[in-house]
Amino acid sequence: MAQNVLLGLKSINRVLAALIGIMLLGCAAFVLADIVLRQTGSSLGGTDEISGYVMAIVTSWGMAYALGELGHVRIDILRSRARPGGRALFDLVAMLALSATVTLIAVRSWPVVARSLDNGSRANTPLETPLALVQVPWFAGWVWFAVASWLTFIAALMLLAKRDFAASDAAIGTLGELDGLQK
């Protein structure tokens, strides 16, 4: 069951990563079009604001993908010297800390979104962008990251209960310097 959860999360996050990539490409095309238009004396305007919004949204959604690909940075000097059981313990503690931190971020982000929704807040910029249009998907990305983190933590805990250190390492371990080059 734990492996199915991890595979399901990877599948979902790969689809999300593709959508994020499309969103980034669209943003880059928008910025490029604005640069070209500036050469003719006109401009689309607001590219800096819109690209900032896009970056906030894709970052919050991309974090879960990075988790599944072991892309989060971790100082692993002690972990690398431990035996499989010790490495698994370090990984589990790191995963627990990450899950708790991301959950706290998601929980503390909600009041910001709720206030924007209640007040109909708009950006203090020429575009006057309704902030909820940006904050709701940004918040949803943090919530998804928290859910994915906890599911990954629970799956790893189940793997460790079976003493499957290799599968746990593949789920929540780290990539060493050479591991990343071999992929």
Image (spheres, helix red, strand yellow):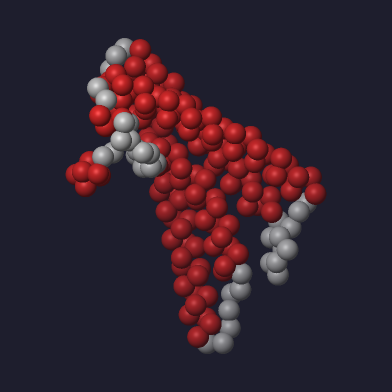
Q: Position of residue 133 (x, y in %)?
A: 65, 52
Near-viewer residue (90 or 3): 90
Is any atom of residue 138 visible in this view? yes
Q: Residue at x 43, y 25 (%)?
A: 93
Query: In screen coordinates, is 170 left or right of 135?
Result: left
Near-viewer residue (154 or 173): 173
Q: Position of residue 34 (x, y in %)?
A: 52, 75
Query: In screen coordinates, is 130 left or right of 104?
Result: right
Q: Position of residue 89 (x, y in %)?
A: 36, 22
Q: Position of residue 51 (x, y in %)?
A: 54, 62
In the picture, the quarter occupied by the C terminus is top left
View extreme (right): residue: 119
Count of numbered marks: 0
Above-or-below relation of 52 to 66: below
Q: Residue at x 46, y 51 (%)?
A: 20
Is any atom of residue 15 visible in this view? no
Above-or-below relation of 33 to 5: below
Q: Residue at x 49, y 49 (%)?
A: 59
Q: Residue at x 64, y 45 (%)?
A: 136
Query: In screen coordinates, is 137 left or right of 33?
Result: right
View extreme (top): residue: 162
Above-or-below relation of 17 to 79: below
